Amino acid sequence: MSHSAGDARAGAGRFAPSPSGDLHLGNLRTAVLAWLFARSTGRRFLIRVEDLDRVRPGAQERQLADLAALGLDWDDEVVHQSRRLPLYDAAIARLTRAGLTYECFCTRREIQHAASAPHAPQGAYPGTCRTLTEAERAAKRASGRPAAIRLRSGAVTFTVHDVVHGDFAGVVDDLVLRRGDGIPAYNLAVVVDDAAQGIDQVVRGDDLLTSAPRQAYLAALLGLPVPTYAHVPLALNVHGKRLAKRDGAVTLTDQAALGHTAADVLGRIAVSLDLADKDEPVTLELLLGRWDPARLPREPWVYDGSW
């Protein structure tokens, strides 16, 4: 099964896991959806390993093996964020030259206390360091406190269009571009990477919907195209919490120990997406022929361990 002859001008979709552990059924379901969205629209499908933060040895190899076991294929080399630091540095430098960044010395606790003030938008940075004088910044540097680099935002909200949720307006605050430990922030890295890779379709869990306006605003500031978004329902456990490793047999390895093959797991995912009947043998090619984004279930998939 190869789709790599797809027209590059048609853009690309992607799946971008963090190599912090094995993929669980919710992650795998999102990967299948990202592949279906991309392939059904003639796009390339790319894999990006978001390894700027937590990396567990061997996790990336197992993740890619699990995706392949489900039948997912991808185009081009797998990209690693840890090898793209100059791209992020260049984007931050460009914003700095435009007067759109400042140093922030706040701790997480200080931000939480300040952000609980009545006038601050929920979850937004309250701008504590935005108006520091040069002398105040110098004093904080001299105290040894590391500085993050924040965006000097000119917006309070920004609206994106989402294939699943329609128009969504979210808070845009002075988001972090580079953390105090020197690591580029997620919101910056994904914007730079998606544009650099020609990714114009972002399919991911709807827990990330609120970050889309920040990322789209940042892309616009950098003169980069804003992708099409589709934030898809998550897999939840029986308690209504996001599915996690502690919820039992939720990885392909776990399922194999119970006698379920990767093909069985793909079938279970297909049933959860209303793309197949229970116990019906399926392949990704079969699901692609049945795929209609308008019929995507809008409610989360509650996985209770049953088959």
Image (tube, helix red, strand yellow):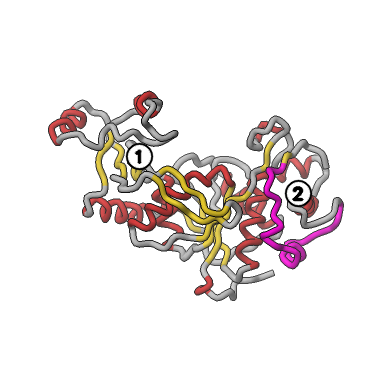
Residue 7: name its quadrant. bottom right
Q: Is residue 295 above or below residue 176?
A: below
Where is residue 23 shown, x and y percent of the image?
63, 45
Task: Give me the residue at 58% from left, 74% from top.
Answer: 6
* Residue 90 % position (x, y): 30, 56
Q: Earlier in the sequence, mark 1 or mark 2?
A: 1
User: In percent of the image, x 34 and y 37: which residue is there?
Assistant: 181
Quadrant of residue 235 within the rendered picture: top right
Q: Which residue is drawn at 73% across and 62% down?
A: 284
Q: Name the amino acid, label 2.
A: Ser
Q: What residue type is labelled 1?
A: Arg
Give above or below for 107 relative to 101. Answer: above
**Labels 1 and 2 touching (C-beta < 8 A):** no
Q: Name the residue under label 2.
A: 272
Residue 18 vs 238, above or below: the answer is below
| Residue 205 falls within the magenta-colored stretch | no
* 8 relative to 277 in the view: left or right: left
In the image, residue 106 sits, relative to residue 83, either above or below, namely: above
Left or right: where does residue 213 sit relative to residue 13? Answer: left
